[in-house]
Amino acid sequence: MTNHSNNPTIGGKTSMKTIREAINDALREEMRRDPTVIILGEEVSGGAGCDGEDDAYGGVFGVTKGLMPEFGRERVIDTPISEAAIIGAAAGAANNGLRPVAELMFFDFIGVSFDQIFNQAAKFRYMFGGKSKTPMVIRGTVGGGWRAGAQHSSMLHSIVTHVAGLKVVMPANAYDAKGLMVQAIRDDDPVIFLEHKVMYDIACEVPDEQYSIPFGEASFPRQGNDVTIVAISNMVTHAITVADILAEEGIGCDVIDPRTVSPLDHEAILESVEVTGRLVIIDEGNPRCGLATDIAGIVAEHGFYSLKAPILTVTAPHTPVPFAPELEDAYLPNAEKLMVAVREVLAAGRSGA
Amino acid sequence: MPYSTEFLLSAYRTMKTIREFEERCVKEFEGGNIPGFTHVSNGQEAIAVAACIDLSDKDIIGSTHRGHGHCIAKGCDVGGMMKEIMGRATGLCKGKGGSMHIADIDKGMLGANAIVGGGPPLVNGAALAAKTLGTKNVALSFNGDGSANQGTVFEAMNLAVVLKLPHVFVYENNGYAEGTAANYGVGSNSLTDRNAGFGMPAECVDGLDFFATYEVLKTATERARNGGGPTAIEAMCVRFDGHFIGDPQLYRGKDEIKNARKNQDCLKIFRERVIAEGWLKAAAMNAIDKEVMVEIETAVVDALAAPHPDPATDLMSDVYCSY
Ligand SMILES: Cc1ncc(C[n+]2csc(CCOP(=O)(O)OP(=O)(O)O)c2C)c(N)n1
Ligand SMILES: [Mg+2]
C-alpha cells in the first residue's frame, strides 16, 4: 500500500482544539498572512447596525467569532440575506484579486445561489480557456441530527461533487479541518468546504503552526486487512466505532476517509480493496446518484477482480430529512446500520483470495 | 362603533391565542419538549391577525420561519400545531415538518418556510391560480425586513406587478434579521419607498396598532380582490424574544426588550384602545384570557400525550403521490 499522508506529525507545539476552533485558527492565520483574504456572509460577525454588542454571533455556529474585532468590518463582512449576491460577489472578487471565504449559514441555501456557483464560479476557467482563476471558498454547514427539518439538514455534497470545476472538502476532525481550510484558501479554484453541524465540538490535538493538507489524499483513521470501509464527514465517527468493535473480535477494518470528495483519492480506495476484497461505503447523502454509488461504481469498474463480495452501501433513504426525532434517527446512517452491512459483507461471497 | 363586537372579540381572542401559544412554546422548548429550531412571534400578533381576519379558507397565505402566529390567525388548529412542533404523528404535518414547516392547505395556509424568501414566489403562484381561475380569492405573503433583501422576493414583486396578481406583500419590520439591524440590511432609507419603486402601492403602518394595520390591509386586500393588483405593506413591530428560542441576543440594546414588553405591546395597546373607546369591556377580554389559557394548556397536554411517528411506516411515505 502506498504511504498516503496520514496526519503527518508537524514539529512544534500542539493543542487540543475543536473543529470549530481549528477552522477559526485557519481563517485567522490566513487573514493575518494574506491581506486579500476576506470573509463574507450572514451574521459572520453579527450585530451590524445594532445597539448591542458587535460580533454578537461570529457566525451562528461561532466559527468566525473574534475575526471581525481583529480584522474589521471591511474584511469580515456581514451581508443582507441575499445568497445569490453573496456567492456572486465572492466569485467576482476572486477573479479580481481577493481570496474570499463566503459562508452559506446552512448549505441548504445553495438553492438560492446555485447559478452563481455552478454556472458561474465553477465554469469560468474552462470557458475562458484557462485564463482565469477563481480562488474562493464557500463554507457551509451540512447534515442532520439537529432536528432542524427538511430545509436545514440536507447533505448536498453529491450535488456539488457532480459539478466539474468545483473542489469539495469534508473534514472529519479538527486536524484535517485546519489543514484543509488552509489549503482551500490558498487553492486557486473554487472550493466548497462542508462542515457537519454535529461535529463542531469534537476535539483532537492540532498543531499550533499553520500547515496545509493537500486535496485528493485520503487518511486512514483505522487500518486492517479484512474489510474496507469508506466514510466521510460525520460518517467517519461511525466507521471508527465499528472498526474498534470488530478489532476486538480480531477483524481488521481498513477505514478510509477521503477528506476531499473532489478530487477523490481513487487509488487509496482501490489499493485497500485489493487487499481486503470487501467494501462498505457509508454516506449520509441520499442514495441515488450519490457519493456511495459513485465510489461503488469506481471500484466495480476498476477493482472488480479484487472483490470477494458485493459492495454494500449504507446511506440515508430516498426521502427529505424528517423533523421528528424518531424519524430523523431512522433516516440517518449510524454505527448499528454500518455494523450490519459490514458483517454481511464479511459473511458473503467467496472466501480466500 | 366602527367595528362589530364580534369582530373585536375575535381579533382579541386570536391575538391572545398567539401570545399564549408562543410564550408556552418558549416554556416547552426550555423544558426539552420541543426539538429543533423554533422561532416565536410574540410581540407581532397584531399584524398576523389584521392580515388574516377577513380572509376565507380559500384565500392563501404563505409564511416564514416565524410562522406560528400566521397559522393561528389563518385558522390552523392549535392542538395540531403544538403536536407538529413537538414532532408527533398526529401533528398537522404528521411530525415530518416541525415548527418551520407547518402547513394546512385546507385552511389556505401554504406553509411556513425555512428558506428566507422562499414564500413570495409561491404565493404569486397562488395568486396566479386565483386570477386565472377567476375565483376572486387573494393571496398574501408574510415577509420580514431581512427577507425583503432576497432576490426571490424582488423577482416575485416585479412579477406580481407585471401580471397584476392579487398578492398582498406584508413586510413585518421588527428591526432585525437575526442579529443584523434592518437599517443596515435594507440599503434603502425606506423599505416602503423601495417597495413603491416596484410599481405597486406601498404603505408603512404602525404594526403595533391593530386598527391602523387592519385598515391598510383591508384596502390592499380589496384592491387585490377587485383586480387592482398587488400592494406592499410594511408594518413596524417588535420581536419580544430572540431570533430563535435560546438566542442570547447580545446584539440588542440594554433594556430594549424590557421596554418593548412594557411600552410596545400590541395586545396592551389593543386593550387600552377598545376600553377607552368603550367598544369592549375588560371583563369580556378577561374571560377570553381564561379560555385561551385553557385551550393552550389542553393543546400542550394533548401534544405531550400524542403518539410519536413510527419509522417503519412513516419515514418512507409521502415522498411522492405515486411510486
Ligand atoms: C435562504 C436563507 N438564508 C438565510 C437563512 C437564515 N435565516 C433564517 S431567519 C433569518 C432572518 C430573517 O429575518 P427577517 O426576514 O427580518 O425575519 P424575522 O426573523 O425578523 O422574523 C435568517 C438570516 C434562511 N433560513 N434561509
Ligand atoms: Mg426581521
Image: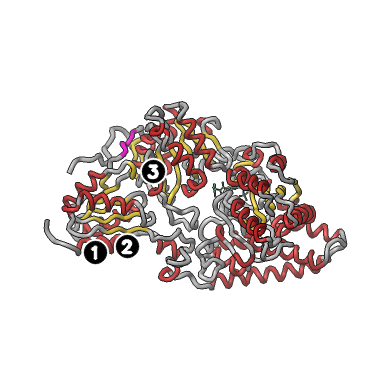
Q: CA distance from mark 2 to mark 3?
A: 30 Å
Q: Identify the disc placed on residue A344.
A: 1
Q: Residue at x 58, y 49 (%)?
A: B117
* Residue situated in front as seen by the camera: B271 or B231: B231
User: Seen in the image, is A115 located left or right of residue B125?
Assistant: left
Q: Identify the disc placed on residue A30.
A: none
Q: Is residue B195 among the parts visible in the rendering? A: yes
- Give coordinates of residue B79: x percent, y percent: 61, 69
Tag 3, which secondary structure?
loop
Query: Could you confirm whether marks 2 and 1 are on the same chain?
Result: yes
Q: CA distance from mark 2 to mark 1?
A: 11 Å
Of badges 1 and 3, the one in the foreground is 3
Res A53 quadrant in image: top right
Query: What amino acid type is highlighted by mark number 2?
Result: Lys
For label 1, the crowd category at 10 Å Cα-Cα, with few meaning under 14, some 14 to 19 and many 20 or more, is: some
| Screen quadrant of the N terminus of chain B | bottom right
Query: Is residue A214 inside the magenta stretch?
Result: yes
- Disc 2 marks which residue? A337
Query: What amino acid type is highlighted by mark number 3?
Result: Val
User: Seen in the image, is B221 located left or right of residue B144?
Assistant: right
Is residue A304 placed above or below A38 in the rendered structure?
below
Tag 1, which secondary structure?
helix
Q: Chain of mark 3?
A: A
Q: Which residues are magenta?
A: A211-215
Q: Residue at x 57, y 55 (%)?
A: B113
Q: Identify the disc placed on residue A163.
A: 3
Q: Chain of mark 1?
A: A
Res B31 quadrant in image: bottom right
* Residue situated in front as seen by the camera: A140 or A336: A140
Q: What secondary structure prevails in the magenta region?
A: loop
Q: Are marks 2 and 3 in contact (CB under 8 Å)?
A: no
Q: Chain of mark 2?
A: A
